[in-house]
Image: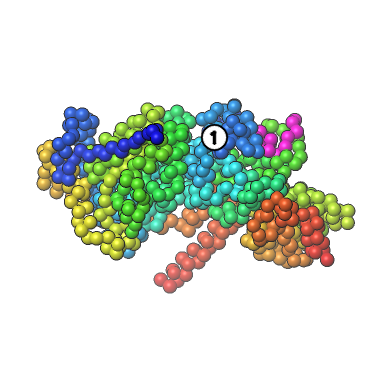
Amino acid sequence: MTTTAQFNIHYRQYLDAEGQFLPTVDQAALPAFVRDAAELVKMYEMMVLVRTFDTKAINLQRTGKLGTYPPALGHEAAQVGAAAALRDEDVIAPVYREIGTQIWRGVTMAEILRYWGGDETGNNFAHSRHDFPWCVPIGTQTLHAAGAAMAFKIRNEPRCALAYIGDGGTSEGAFYEAMNVAGVRKLPVVFYVINNGWAISVPLAQQTAAQTLAQKGIAAGIPCIQVDGNDVLAVRHTMAEALQRARDGDGPTVVEALTYRLSDHTTADDASRYRQADEVQHGWTVEPIKRMRNYLVNLQLWDDTREQALKQSCSAQVDSAVQDYLATPRQPVTAMFDYLFATLPPRVLAQREEALQWANKKLSGSNQHG
Amino acid sequence: MAKVTLVEAIAMAQMWEMSRDSSVVALGEDIGINGGVFRATQGLQEKFGSERVIDTPLAEGMIAGLCVGMAAQGLKPVAEIQFMGFIYPAVDQIVNHMTRLRNRTRGRLTCPVVIRTPHGGGIHSPEHHSEAVEAMFCHMPGLRVVCPSSPARAYGLLLAAIRDPDPVLFLEPVRIYRYAKQEVADNGQALPLDVCYVLREGNDCSIVTWGAMTVETLKAADELAKQGIQVEVIDLATISPIDAETILDSVAKTGRLVIVHEAARNVGVGAEIAAIVAEHGLYDLEAPIQRVTGYDTVVPLSRLEHEYAPSVERIVAAVRRTLS
């Protein structure tokens, strides 16, 4: 027998858990943003804002002011690093947890709260008009990104699509189908696996026998790479390279970012039922924000005074978003009908009238009692 | 004016619209160089190239998912699912995304997609090639389900479906793909969706049907005419949303209703039509509503398939029951 094909999966990490460059890193070969103070600080500030928002969102849920919410805790570098590599005109197909990417791309925190608070207007992003909405059915969004990439390719536009997916999602057929067609047609799309080790209660070892999730791209004939998802520098550089490849017409890439879900799956979950506390404690020792802060401090770009100011600013921004969210009036009952079709068919129009009448009756009823 | 079959009219409509509108793309399995297994995309790839007429890998869920992505970014995909029995992997994308993207984003993103698929049996196909499961899709909010019954209506309704700003499941009755040729003007003229087409007028009984069953029903109408019974034959054409008004007006005139469909009876579209008439036209009825349908069984293989679908005899008998 002879060997007909051989494959390797490369892993990229620049910073260690304390924010020091690994000794193997050739710092001179790193991309320009690694020395760009403004860019570095911007990414760090966003990561802290995401964590501030996350904490507040959980509090809102616990006090009955928000629906089920999927925390981003621990994913800040994976989300922000990817977002920073994107261009405005690119399109993302996110999972439901991509808080950091969404805020970076201009989705307002009030919009995010509206969505998780049970209001579809939260998906009507005022800024990133072309991005796909939060996606709940696991893995399905990878095909939307591939389809978007197909549209860009057909129209000859220098744009990319970025599909997010979790470790559990890589078991879905849609993921394989999307990678496969993207490989065949050299689509400008990046499949970004954020591997946080857990799909609700199912650990990676029960999800796959594969050594890495990145290697799932090999069968589709597309390049794949693994990166430390808690190292925002490595994430951003890797995503920028993958997106540039796509933009240059060289086709798709699979990027697997290794991170850890420090929170419950959602606010409706209790992870202590199925995972050990020491595992979570270890997760905290490699978490992304401390690492980036140390890096900035070492570069003398950051200090306690700036940290205090940032925390105050983040709290104020989040509080303002919460006020905006809480002041949002409920959509009229007719809203559930008004976006079903461009023109509502008569039988559904009749149901719209019926719903409106019941809502008005309830309203006048409550007025009488009030 | 050329005389064409229904399947030729389907290809003609796509050819017209792809020439007119550069945002229209076609995709599916074997639709390119092969022109589709029924030749419904004959000549498209030759004319528009392999970037706009895409032979996809073999995965129906992928086809539907790509459509969502392309449509949300401004294209108008016309996808072919090779047989309706293979549409099930695509249901996730159709139901969870295609039909609700407009609603989920409050109109920010939309899905002007047409999914074309052969419908029903009657041509001695292998297993899984003869399904008629339109009722499943009619249950889904945000989706139009359309089924033409002649070359002219196939041409006009497909143009309308492609131009519609929302997703349309376009069912092509295989039994009449090549049943008869009809003169069809290739002039880009669409026919209205969401309305029934009255194929034959009559005062004694209304028959509502669609797709290939219009042929059996019109034969039954001829048979009944010989017996002095004049039936009104209504082609539903847009199966969802239903044009209730035309049906109710007809029942008000005839006082009798027979519904004919190839699909199984249980929770079929006939049940919805019967319920509409029961809710809004009960006092017009002079006899119980009759349904002539496929049986609530698995579609049999070819040797029994003609026993499964409604026949002229079964339709005639149902009409006579309403008059007895």
Q: Position of residue A240 (x, y in %)?
A: 30, 34
Residue at 78% over, 58% down: B314
Q: Is the stretch drawn in magenta largely helix, strand or loop?
A: helix
Q: Nearer the viewer, residue A44 or A313?
A: A44
Residue at 62% over, 53% down: B133
Asked whether residue B181 appears in the rendered view, the answer is yes
Q: Secondary structure at mark 1?
A: strand
Residue at 34% over, 62% down: A268
Would residue B31 be found to the left or right of residue A163 on screen? right
Would residue B210 be found to the left or right of residue A136 on screen? right
Would residue A170 be found to the left or right of residue B58 on screen? left
Q: Amino acid at mark 1?
A: Asp
Q: Nearer the viewer, residue A136 or A165?
A: A165
Quadrant in which the C terminus of chain B is drawn: bottom right
Would residue A156 be found to the left or right of residue B132 on screen? left
From this view, report whether residue B35 is shown above or below residue B61.
above
The magenta span reads B1-16
Q: Quadrant of residue A35?
A: top left
Other-residue count near label 1 (Cα within 10 Å), few / some / many at <14 / 14–19 / ≥20: many
| Label 1: chain letter | B
Q: Nearer the viewer, residue A237 or B185?
A: A237
Q: Position of residue A47 (x, y in %)?
A: 24, 46
Residue at 69% over, 35% down: B8
Q: Nearer the viewer, residue B162 or B172?
A: B172
The number of callouts visible is 1
Q: Position of residue A351 (x, y in %)?
A: 56, 59
Quadrant in which the N terminus of chain B is drawn: top right
Mark 1 lies on residue: B55
Image coloring type: rainbow
